Image (cartoon, coloured by chain):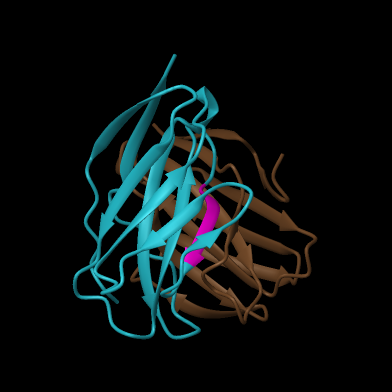
Amino acid sequence: DTEVTQTPKHLVMGMTNKKSLKCEQHMGHRAMYWYKQKAKKPPELMFVYSYEKLSINESVPSRFSPECPNSSLLNLHLHALQPEDSALYLCASSLPTSTRLLHFGNGTRLTVT
Amino acid sequence: DAKTTQPPSMDCAEGRAANLPCNHSTISGNEYVYWYRQIHSQGPQYIIHGLKNNETNEMASLIITEDRKSSTLILPHATLRDTAVYYCIALGGSQGNLIFGKGTKLSVKP
C-alpha cells in the first residue's frame, strides 16, 4: 500500500469532457508533484507545488490545470484533452527540503477517446 | 545534472544477486546518485542514494566507484517481486527535481 492515494484508478473520458484527478497524502509533506507516464516510457515531470504554490510548470498545455487546495490535496483538472494525452498520471509528495526522496501514488490510468 | 547510462534490460535468477550498473561519467562533486524502481502498474519507489561512500539499507546496496563515474545497485537475493524497471538518477545540490531516464528493466526468473 502507498501513503499517497490517487483517485480514480482508471478514467475514460471523451475529448469534450471535463474531469479531475485527485491526490491525497497525510505525511505532512509540503511539496507535491504531477508526473505523466506514457506506455513503456519513463515518468515525465509536469508540475511541482511547494507550500501550496505552483513552483514549476514544465511547459504543460493549458488543458491540464493543477490545483493545490491545501497541504494534503493535489488536483489535476482536465479539459478538452486529446487521445495522445492518454497515459498514467502519477502524483508524488516529499518534504520541501528533500525533493529527491519522493513518495509516489500508484497513478490514475487515463484513456481519452 | 549528470547524464546516466543504463543497460535497457537484464535477467537474474531468483535467489541470486542482481547487479545493476549505471554510468555517470560526467558526475560532479556535489551530485548524488539516486535509485528508484517501478514495479508494473505501480508508482516509482525510492530505493537508495549515495554520494561517494557505499551505502546499504534493507532493500539494497549501492557501490560507487572511487572516481564516482559509475555505480552498481545490488539486490542481494533477488525475488520474483523484484522484477521492475530500475532508474539511476544523478542530481546535485539539495534541491532540483527528479528527472527519470530510460532505466533498466530487470526480469527475475524462477
Q: Nearer the viewer, residue A37 or B37?
A: B37
- Is B47 a magenta residue? yes
- Is B77 a magenta residue? no
Q: Which residues are magenta?
A: B44-49
Q: Residue at x 54, y 38 (%)?
A: B42
In this view, which residue lies farthest toward the top? B110
Q: Position of residue B95 (x, y in %)?
A: 49, 82
Q: Is residue A41 something that shows in the picture? A: yes
Chain that the image shows in brown: A
Q: Nearer the viewer, residue A89 or B7?
A: B7
Q: Nearer the viewer, residue A79 or A6?
A: A6
Q: Residue at x 52, y 63 (%)?
A: B55
Q: Residue at x 66, y 54 (%)?
A: A23
Looking at the rendering, in which quadrant would you find the C terminus of chain B? top left
Q: Position of residue A73 (x, y in %)?
A: 72, 62
Q: Position of residue B46 (x, y in %)?
A: 55, 55
Number of callouts in the render? 0
Looking at the rendering, in which quadrant would you find the N terminus of chain B? bottom left
Horizontal arrangement in the rendering, residue B110 relative to residue A61 (left or right):
right
Horizontal arrangement in the rendering, residue B18 relative to residue A23 (left or right):
left
Q: Position of residue B80 (x, y in %)?
A: 50, 23
Q: Is residue A80 something that shows in the picture? A: no
Chain that the image shows in cyan: B
In this view, which residue lies farthest toward the front? B66
Q: Residue at x 44, y 63 (%)?
A: B34
